[in-house]
Image: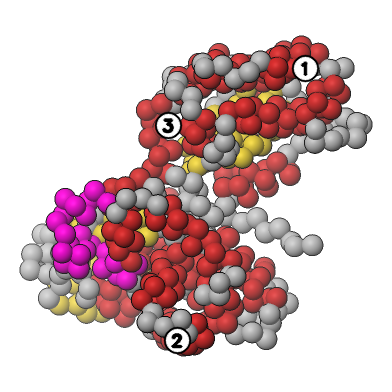
Amino acid sequence: MVKEIFLGRSLQRELIEKRIIDLKNGYRQNIAIIGDELVGKTSLIFNFIRNFSDPHILPLYLEVRPEPFKDFKRRFMGVLLYAFLDNSSISLQENLDFLIEKSRNFIPKTADKITDLLRNPVSKKKADNFFELLEVCDLIYQESGKRCVVIWDEFHNLEYMGIKTLYAEWSKALITHKNTMFIITSSLPSKAKKILAHNLSLLFGNFQSISLEPFDVHTSEVYLDIKFEGNHLDKGLRNFLVHFSGGYPFYLNLLSEGMLKHEKMPLTQVLVELLFSSTGILNQRFNNYLKRLVSLPNSQDYLSLLYSIASGHNRLKDIMHISHKTAKEINVRLNYLLELDVVTRSGDFFKINDRLFGFWLKFVYQKKANALTFDAKNQKQHFTSYLDVVIKEFIVSSAKPIPERMIELLRLFEDDIIQVEEKKFRLNHFRELKQLEFNSRGLGEGVLGRSEDSVWIMAFKNKKLTEEDVTEFARECKKYRNKLQQKIIISLDEIDINARLRALDEKILTWGLSQVNELMDLYAKPRIVT
């Protein structure tokens, strides 16, 4: 039996539990969980369901698929009745007619309503049918006192049912059925946020949005330590897995399971089997992922854009130079990729959201597409050799002191604009870069960068950043008389809340590893893993 590892999501799970307690007390707050594919939204939901038990609450989990409304209706009612009867002494069957008959002894009005809904054909006014379907949750509460928590995974797929006034009817149900709570998830953050802001923005019954991010460096390290408990894993390889996976739980699990299953197989071979082999899980997944774009008009333009971004040519000016197309032509394609949440934008830069997909696109898909022969064995050997180089380069880079690595990064700045935590600023081209030593008990090393019109002062803190550290850093910065200063403290550990507030007062940016590694990604540099 595979051991379940639940990490890094405790606050989100506690929030869900708190909202359900509020529901029982007469206060209903719906929840929207938004994040990229494979980031762990469904795992969070399943962990909650497995560990939650309350006789007055019915959690109803349903994966929303692109399907006709009549199929969605049957599945929804089946899930509802199965959940209602689950704690009874009845031996249940996954058969809707059976569930209706068994539930009739307890909730006859609800059973009759469901029977009527099944008998009535889906009318042209599908919206009426949708509202009636949601009324069943209110009816079951009236008969049994049980409140429904409706969990719709990938809720945006409701749009495929062809209901013209879908969100208007749903909004009406949210307002009138106050004893039904919704938890919805979506792997299309841009689309989901637009729906929540424009279609489901209500005074009563609105959604509290939770953004689910990949694991941070520390959580990824803990995850791998648990997975490899009792099995030796070289620290360099562990750090590479943290970097390569991008903190996505699905990838961390897949990579670690591959290594544990084939203990004598080197990591490069595990990656070859997953990413290169025609039967590899990730190779098949990414090929299917591309099919969404291949069927589009001008599909080659989209593939070329993605390949360019994956190859590190990820600024608009770079793409224009390579493609020989105008900014207007490129932006039309990029905007569509942004809507699909395939890429994200940070100022002048674009980034493929799924780093493994970007890696596969550059070193597997494109290499195979450009191959002059069908010599798969030779291509496989080249890919294996390249993986060896990638892993060795990462380990060599990881051994360098962090100030040295930051200077290597800062040398690449060319006055481009980036966005970190909704704040935009310019990455000045530096004419001078050097390491600093601070006369401070809390702060040790730092970096100084001078451009034509400004100076950047960076400090690094290995332990918890305190308010006193910020005060001392502010004092050190006053030694530099340049009026235009960018003051940054990079903390490799947690940041005290008072330190953050003090930093705001002093106009000092406080970055963790996640912010630094965002920059590393944009410049195709190995992430920092401590």
Q: Residue furthest front?
A: 373
Kindly report the secondary structure that dominates the magenta region of the rendered protein.
Answer: helix
Name the front one of labels 3 and 2: 2
Gap between marks 3 and 2, in whole Å? 47 Å
Q: Is residue 478 left or right of residue 469?
A: left
Q: Is residue 20 at all visible to an observer of this figure?
A: no
Say if the magenta span includes residue 426.
Answer: no
Q: Foreground residue, 120 or 19?
A: 120
Q: Quadrant of residue 467?
A: bottom left
**Rendered location of residue 240, percent (x, y):** 50, 76
- Extent of the magenta region: 308-333
Q: Foreground residue, 257 or 19?
A: 257
Quick one: label 1 or label 2, which is nearer the N terminus? 1
Secondary structure under tag 2 reads: helix
Q: Is residue 249 left or right of residue 407?
A: right
- What residue is shown at x 45% (from left), y 56% (from top)? 291
Residue density around tag 2, few if under 14, some if 14–19, many if 20 or more, within 10 Å: some
Labels in figure, total = 3
Residue density around tag 1, few if under 14, some if 14–19, many if 20 or more, within 10 Å: many
- Using the image, determine if residue 166 lies above or below residue 426: above
Secondary structure under tag 3 reads: helix
- Going by the numbered disc 3, the residue's amino acid type is Leu
Dot label at residue 382: 2
Name the front one of labels 1 and 3: 1
Q: Is residue 223 left or right of residue 207?
A: right
- Going by the numbered disc 1, the residue's amino acid type is Ala
Q: Is residue 415 at all visible to an observer of this figure?
A: yes
Gap between marks 1 and 2, in whole Å? 63 Å
Dot label at residue 111: 1
Q: Circle 3 is placed at which residue position?
A: 196
- Using the image, determine if residue 304 lies above or below residue 13: below
